[in-house]
């Protein structure tokens, strides 16, 4: 009996020891597991914080206007990046690394996912990395909406960012959808007079400018300017940007004096502002160069292009835009030796940076095609002008002024190739669209604006008149079109002249009225003298 009891106690002792050992092992294992999990957690927290800090650092390299404001440059020939764009390669790669590790290494809720994706989208957009930026913006949009955070300011920035990106990548239907949504959200959330609304109005105006809706664009630029003034923000980069954009609209409408005045104001303002991380000053200077070029002040334009050539990074969109404008200037100056190589270099840069569907690429190959036409290299000109026409049809639409310009380029080439049968219907389409455009946009213009815009359009009518005289043997009806267009355009100009005459005669300025009447008398006298024969003039001692 004692022996059995001893065995029992020994058995219990062994069980207890085994349990104790097991418990000790479990405790060690759990402790190790805890330490591993804790280490993983701390590593993830550290990685998250490192990512946050890196994103803040990357974003700090950019001026906020690079992300928030659309900027028109040189007849919208191309998109400008930010200062030192070539140095952002490593930082862009780091953005890609952060994006890959977010879902693998971080424990993020929807809010943080949304905000980090927004930051990456903004930085990538400022670098000109539009494909990556679009993915990040859309990811941010998804997480904001899934978590019901559509009232947050960062959600509004996400929608506005997508609108701006789609404008700059020429996807105008999407651009209109998101730009309009951003404007409505900001108006409802922040009030109609907030600076965010001023930004959205500016971006909407740039979109409408790109679509050829110039009346709408001018109205929205003016609204944006007024809001900035109401907020006492005239001494800021946003104010300079909106004035620059308004100047580019005036430039497109042929009102060069108003455009040059605005750009001078912009450059003076820039000199007074703290140094910016963007290269907006170079953008504004480029616009000034193009204006001088269009005003036939070639030496001033060339001086600006030479300055830009030294400051702009090679293989950048900025460089491509400058080369395009400089090449056209050299053509105007009859200095053709470098034109072809400059346009080809510009086209190569646009192709590699913005792609072959970009309006900027269409512009430069159109200029190259027209250069070949001028040099009578018609076989070289044909594919380039046709490609430019197709790009503009797809990105801008068939009613856009630049598409109509491409149609005229094609008609002129067919004329030079003596293919009048193909040129006639195309040129008639061009002229009818031009008349329609005048009818749509002349009505709200002032008489002074109409005169400026007519100065811009009149060379097209003169080219058509020359074409019609040459083509009448192929199609007699073209002379009727010529006469109809002369009557239509004369009516436009006479209507403007009549309004000006009434304003002068009904003004309270007696000296102005007297000078105007004297001018009319002199004009009538000259008209009478004009019909006299040489003998009559000699007899009257004139």
Image (cartoon, grey):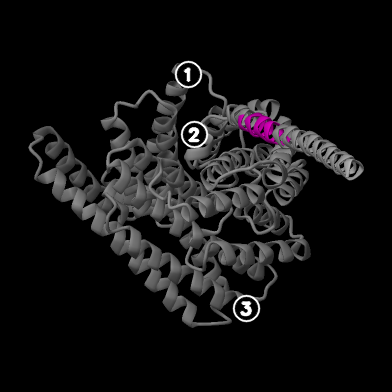
Residue 414, x across and y down, in percent: 65, 70
Predominant secondary structure in magenta?
helix
Mark 1 and mark 2 lie on one chain; the one further toward the N terminus is 2
Mark 3 against mark 1, which lies toward the viewer? 1
Residue shown at 27% from the left, 59% from the top: 443
| Element type where label 2 sits in the image | helix
Q: Which of 219 and 528 is in front in this view?
A: 219
Q: In this view, does 130 lie above or below 376?
A: above
Q: What is the C-alpha distance between the residues marked 1 and 2? A: 17 Å
Q: What is the C-alpha distance between the residues marked 3 and 2? A: 48 Å
Quarter placement of the C terminus: top left
| Element type where label 1 sits in the image | helix
> Which residue was labeled with disc 2?
65
Q: Does the magenta stretch include residue 54?
A: no
Q: For the residue carrying disc 3, how many other residues have a C-alpha within 10 Å: few (<14), some (14-19), or many (20+)?
A: few
Quarter placement of the N terminus: top right
Does 175 sit left or right of 453 as displayed?
A: right
Residue range in magenta is 40-52
> Which residue was labeled with disc 3?
422
Q: Are marks 3 and 1 in contact (CB under 8 Å)?
A: no
Q: Which of 234 and 425 is in front in this view?
A: 234
Can residue 253 be seen here? The reply is no
Mark 3 and mark 2 lie on one chain; the one further toward the N terminus is 2
Q: In this view, does 393 lie above or below 312?
A: below
> Which residue is most to the front?
1
Q: For the residue carrying disc 1, how many other residues have a C-alpha within 10 Å: few (<14), some (14-19), or many (20+)?
A: few
Residue shown at 53% from the left, 23% from the top: 276
Residue shown at 27% from the left, 53% from the top: 527
Does 537 sit left or right of 260 as displayed?
A: left
Q: Is residue 395 above or below residue 226?
A: below
Res. 271 mark = 1
Can residue 444 be seen here? The reply is yes
């Amino acid at each position: 009996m004692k022996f059995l009891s001893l065995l029992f106690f020994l058995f219990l002792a062994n069980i207890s020891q085994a349990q104790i050992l097991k418990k000790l092992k479990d405790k060690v294992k759990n402790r190790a597991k805890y330490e591993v999990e804790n280490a993983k957690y701390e590593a993830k927290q550290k990685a998250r914080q490192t990512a946050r800090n890196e994103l803040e650092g990357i974003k700090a390299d950019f001026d906020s206007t690079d992300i928030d404001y659309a900027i028109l440059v040189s007849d919208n020939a191309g998109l400008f990046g930010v200062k030192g764009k070539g140095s952002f390669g490593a930082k862009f790669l780091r953005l890609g690394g952060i994006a890959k590790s977010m879902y693998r290494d971080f424990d993020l809720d929807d809010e943080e996912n949304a905000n980090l994706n927004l930051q990456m989208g903004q930085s990538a957009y400022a670098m000109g990395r539009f494909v990556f930026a679009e993915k990040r913006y859309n990811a941010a949009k998804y997480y904001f909406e899934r978590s019901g955070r559509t009232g947050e300011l960062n959600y509004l920035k996400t929608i506005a960012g997508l609108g701006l990106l789609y404008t700059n990548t020429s996807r105008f239907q999407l651009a209109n959808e998101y730009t309009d949504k951003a404007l409505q959200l900001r108006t409802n959330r922040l009030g109609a007079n907030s600076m965010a609304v001023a930004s959205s109005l500016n971006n909407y105006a740039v979109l409408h400018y790109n679509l050829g809706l110039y009346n709408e664009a001018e109205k929205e630029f003016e609204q944006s300017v007024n809001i900035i003034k109401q907020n006492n923000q005239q001494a800021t980069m946003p104010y300079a940007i909106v004035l620059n954009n308004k100047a580019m609209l005036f430039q497109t409408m042929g009102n060069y004096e108003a455009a040059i005045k605005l750009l001078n104001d912009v450059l003076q303002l820039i000199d007074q502002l703290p140094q910016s991380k963007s290269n907006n000053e170079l953008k504004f200077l480029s616009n000034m160069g193009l204006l001088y070029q269009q005003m036939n002040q070639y030496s001033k334009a060339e001086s600006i292009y030479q300055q830009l050539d030294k400051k702009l990074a090679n293989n950048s969109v900025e460089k491509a835009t400058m080369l395009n404008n400089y090449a056209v200037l050299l053509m105007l100056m009859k200095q053709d030796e470098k034109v072809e190589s400059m346009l080809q270099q510009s086209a190569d840069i646009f192709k590699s940076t913005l792609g072959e569907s970009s309006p900027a690429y269409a512009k430069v190959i159109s200029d190259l095609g027209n250069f070949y036409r001028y040099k009578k290299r018609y076989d070289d000109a044909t594919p380039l002008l046709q490609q430019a026409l197709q790009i503009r049809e797809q990105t801008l639409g068939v009613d856009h002024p630049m598409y109509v310009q491409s149609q005229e380029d094609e008609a002129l080439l067919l004329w030079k190739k003596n293919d009048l049968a193909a040129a006639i219907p195309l040129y008639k389409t061009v002229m009818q669209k031009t008349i329609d455009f005048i009818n749509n946009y002349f009505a709200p213009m002032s008489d002074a604006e109409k005169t400026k815009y007519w100065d811009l359009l009149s060379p097209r009518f003169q080219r058509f008149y020359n074409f019609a005289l040459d083509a009448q043997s192929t199609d007699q009806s073209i002379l009727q079109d010529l006469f109809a267009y002369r009557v239509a355009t004369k009516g436009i100009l006479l209507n403007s002249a009549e309004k000006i005459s009434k304003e002068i005669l009904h003004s309270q300025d007696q000296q102005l009225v007297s000078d105007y009447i004297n001018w009319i008398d002199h004009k009538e006298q000259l008209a009478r003298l004009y019909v006299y024969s040489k003998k009559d003039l000699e007899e009257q001692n004139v």
